[in-house]
Image (cartoon, rainbow, N blue to C red):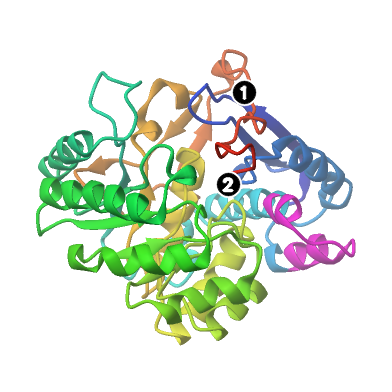
Amino acid sequence: MKIERVESMLIGGDESAPGNHIVRIWTDSGLSGIGQSACWGYPEAVDQMVKKFAGYLIGKDPLEIEHHWQYLYRMGPFRGSALSGAISAVDIALWDIKGKHFDAPVWQLLGGKTRDKIRLHLLMGSRLPDAADQGTTAEGLLINAQAAAAEGFTAVKIDPLPDGFQSMTQSRLIRETRDNVAALREGSGEDVDIILEIHRKLTPMIAVALAESLLEFHPLFYEDPIQIDSIITQGEIAKRTSMPVANGERMHSIWEFRELLENGGPQYVRPDLGLAGGITHVKKIAAIAESYHSAVATHNYLGPVLTAAAVQIDASIPNFITQEYTKRDEDDVHAVYKNSLKRTGGYIDVPEAVGIGVELDDSKIASSPFVSKNLLNIPMRVDGSVGYSV
């Protein structure tokens, strides 16, 4: 069996979320595999890299996944999110082919399952239903948390920072954030874990002060409180607060995750299979985290392909704790994907479909035009300086 064709496609998206970069690899036996990158800021760059990779991949045995990973990573003396995103998409597609070749779900090829169902944490909105323009409100958080708990979710995640936080005094920022988290806890109750996603918006000093003010609400973890510029500084935050910290959704390799953990934290790692090297590499990241007694909460908000790939890892590792999930996976915006995953309440059963369990519906590709992320619209402070970038 040989690789016959490599397709690199930019598909879908709308004003609320960027489109997807998809890779589909075909073999001369008729099998195909699908993968996706998560470098959503620069998908056009990733698309070009995969097209460059095709010159190497065509004619190769698709089952030699580790060898291809190493070759693609080392064929040029570069590193970074676009390169790792391209390799991730190819890697996932090759694992999809391998599962189909052996007539097994990918998790079966990774050592078998360690659980029967995958716990989800809902990426939850902060606005009131049918009121999309009033911003983050405590009332919206409370009502939405109640609804998520009633539906069966045992974990929810929000960005708790108030609108306009970047120009607030520290005192007001902490008070209004605390009000939001209090509402979230009240709405979710004691049987739902709450996760606070800070989106890399704060300085180290404010991040620590805010974390300490929120301890009474017992969040499962406090995610990405500061910018990703320094791995060492990210690790040090976990040593300066008793709040459990999570990092990693913008990291690319086992080497970065090792350095993060060596420098003091975090208690939870957040690799994204579409950015951190695909199934091959995230399995290794999970093993490194396990050696530090750090749990894995896989990152994803880009749709069914990455959810399906992540579930293969989630099922097969001992230190998985929860999978990020958005109900957009179930919306018409993702109708171009034939998805075998089924959610029941706050869980997905470990899938039995071969490969990763998702296919492209070719008949709907033309009706799913690509929408890129607008990177020019970022929050600014009232003094005209850049506030942050997610």
The residue at the point 28 percent across, 47 percent down is 176
Magenta span: predominant SS is helix
31 drawn magenta: no
Q: Which stretch is magenta?
A: 67-85
Q: Which mark is in front, 2 or 1?
A: 2
Q: Residues within 10 Å of mark 2 (few under 14, many from 20)?
A: some
78 drawn magenta: yes
Q: Is residue 104 visible?
A: no
Question: In x, y percent, where is residue 183?
Answer: 17, 46
Which residue type does callout 1 highlight? Val
The residue at the point 82 percent across, 51 percent down is 57
User: In the displayed structure, would residue 4 be above or below residue 377?
Assistant: below
Q: Which residue is mark 2?
A: 388
Q: Which residue is mark 1?
A: 371
Question: In x, y percent, where is residue 249?
Answer: 53, 57
**Residue 258 quadrant:** bottom right
The residue at the point 46 percent across, 54 percent down is 299
Which residue type does callout 2 highlight? Tyr
Secondary structure of the residue carrying tag 1 is: loop
- Pick the residue in front: 127 or 327: 127
User: In the displayed structure, would residue 18 be above or below residue 150?
Assistant: above
User: Is 276 positioned to the left or the right of 226 in the image?
Assistant: right
- Pick the residue in front: 355 or 345: 345
User: Is 296 positioned to the left or the right of 150 in the image?
Assistant: right
The residue at the point 47 percent across, 62 percent down is 270
